[in-house]
Image (tube, rainbow, N blue to C red):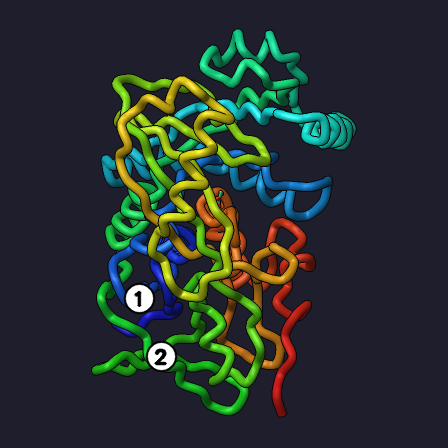
Amino acid sequence: MRPEVIVVGAGAIGSSVAYYLAKAGVRVMLFDRGEAGHEATRASAGMLIPLSESTGPGPFTDLAIESARLFQALNDELLERTGIDIGYRRTPLLRVALDEMEEHELRERRGWQDRSGIPVAWLDASSALDLEPGLNPQLRAALYYANDHQVNALDLTRALVRATVDLGATLRERTPVEGLILEGDRVTGIETGGETVHAAEVVIATGAWSAAWGASLRTSLPVRPVRGQMVAVQTSGTPIRNVVFSNAGYMVSKPEGLTYVGATEEEAGFDSRPTAGGVAWLLGVIPRLVPGLSAAKFAGAWAGLRPGTPDRLPLLGRLPGWQGVTLATGHFRNGVLLAPATGQLISDLVRLQRSRLPLQAFDPARFTIRAA
Ligand code: GLY
C-alpha cells in the first residue's frame, strides 16, 4: 500500500514521528539502514532531565519541559499497546557544584528557574548528602529536581516501532534510503537499492547523518556528528537513586545494576568507537562525583554520535524552497528527551500545517542556504 508519509531513520526521533503520525491515522512507512534505535539512541543514558541542558527561559526550555511531561502518557499507552516496559522511572536530578565557579553557575540557574516558576530546590552540601549519601562529601551545593525521570532509550524505540507497526505502518529495517525522488521543487519519494516508493511527504530523521541529504536538496544542512563516549560499572542493587550531574560529567544507575557514566563531547567525524583517552576521562568522573563507586567492577564502554547543530538546537520543520520534505533532526544531546514532543509536533505539521508550540527557534530556515 502506498504510504502517505515516509520517515527516514528509526531512532528515537524517527520512530516517535512515525508513531504519532500512525496514531493519527496516517499511512506511514519507516526506513532504517540498520536496526531501529541502533545508533545514537542505543548509546543514550535515557535521562529525562529537561532543566539540565537549558541555559535560560525560552523555546528550548519550553520544548524540553513539554516533552518530559508527555512521557507519562506515552509510557502508559506504549505499555498498553505493546506490553513493553520502556523503563520510565522517577529518578530525580541532583545538579551538584564541586567548586566555587560551579556554585555560582548553580545560583544563576536557580535564579532564572525560580523566576520562571520551575520547581527547583537549593540544597546545601549536608542536605544533598542526606538525599544521596554516596556523593563526594566535598561538594559545595546542589540543585534538586524532584520530578525528573529516566527511560531505557532502546526499549522506548522498540516500543514506538512495535506500536507503529501494530497501527498499520510498514517498517523496513536494514534498508538504506539511497536517494530522494525530486520533481521540480517537490520531494515525491525515496529510492532504496531495489525499490522506489512515492509519498506526499518525506520526513528526514537521520540524526548525525542528516547533512548528506543537503547535496541532492542543493541546501546546506549543518548537522555534524558529535561523539559521546560512556562507560558503565556494575554493582549489586542501585547505588545512586538520583541522576548526579555536574560540569565534570554525569552518573545514573540503571535498574539492571549498571551505573552509566557520561559523557565526552568530541568532534571525531563518523568514528563511533570508544577510545582509551575517553574511557580514562570518564573513569576519572567517578571519584569526583560518587567516590565509593571507584571500587565497582568495570562493565563496558561504548559511544554514539549526537547530531550537533551550530546553535545546539534541533532542526524541526519544512525545508525552505522545497515541498514534500520535513526535517526532524539535530537534537544534539536531547534526542531521547525530545522524542515525544518532536513526534507530536511533526505529526501536527505534516497533517495540519500547524503546531501547538512555536517552532520559529527550530526552523531549518535559520541556517539553510540554497544553491541556485
Ligand atoms: N544527554 C546527555 C548527553 O548527550 O551526553
Horizontal side of 5 relative to 246 (left or right) equals: left
Q: Are marks 1 and 2 in contact (CB under 8 Å)?
A: yes
Number of residues whose C-alpha sits closer than 10 Å to that of mark 2, classed few (under 14), some (14–19) or many (20 or more):
many
- Residue assigned mark 2: 190
The percent position of residue 311, horizontal first and vertical second, equals 65, 58
Q: How far apart are labels 1 and 2 at the CA level?
A: 10 Å
Picture coordinates of residue 324, whole percent (x, y): 49, 76
Q: What amino acid is labelled 1 in the image?
A: Phe
Name which residue lies at 55% across and 20% down: 146
Q: Which residue is mark 1?
A: 31
Camera-nearest residue between 233 and 81: 233
For the residue labelled by badge 2, is the local secondary structure a helix, a strand or a loop? Answer: strand
Q: Is residue 46 left or right of residue 103?
A: left
Q: Amino acid at mark 2?
A: Ile
Q: Name the side, left or right, on which 233 lies relative to 327.
A: left
Residue 238, given in percent of the width and then of the height, sits at: 33, 19
Picture layout, residue 97 above or below residue 63: above
Query: Could one spot residue 347 in this view of the protein?
Result: no
Residue visible at 37% across and 69% down?
A: 6
Give the position of the N terminus as an image quadrant.
bottom left
Callout 1 crowding tier (Cα within 10 Å): few <14, some 14–19, many ≥20: many
Residue 338, compared with residue 138, is above or below; it is below
Mark drawn on residue 23: none
Q: Residue at x 51, y 78 (%)?
A: 214
Tell me the SS state at disc 1.
Answer: strand
Residue placed most toward the observer, 311 or 292: 292
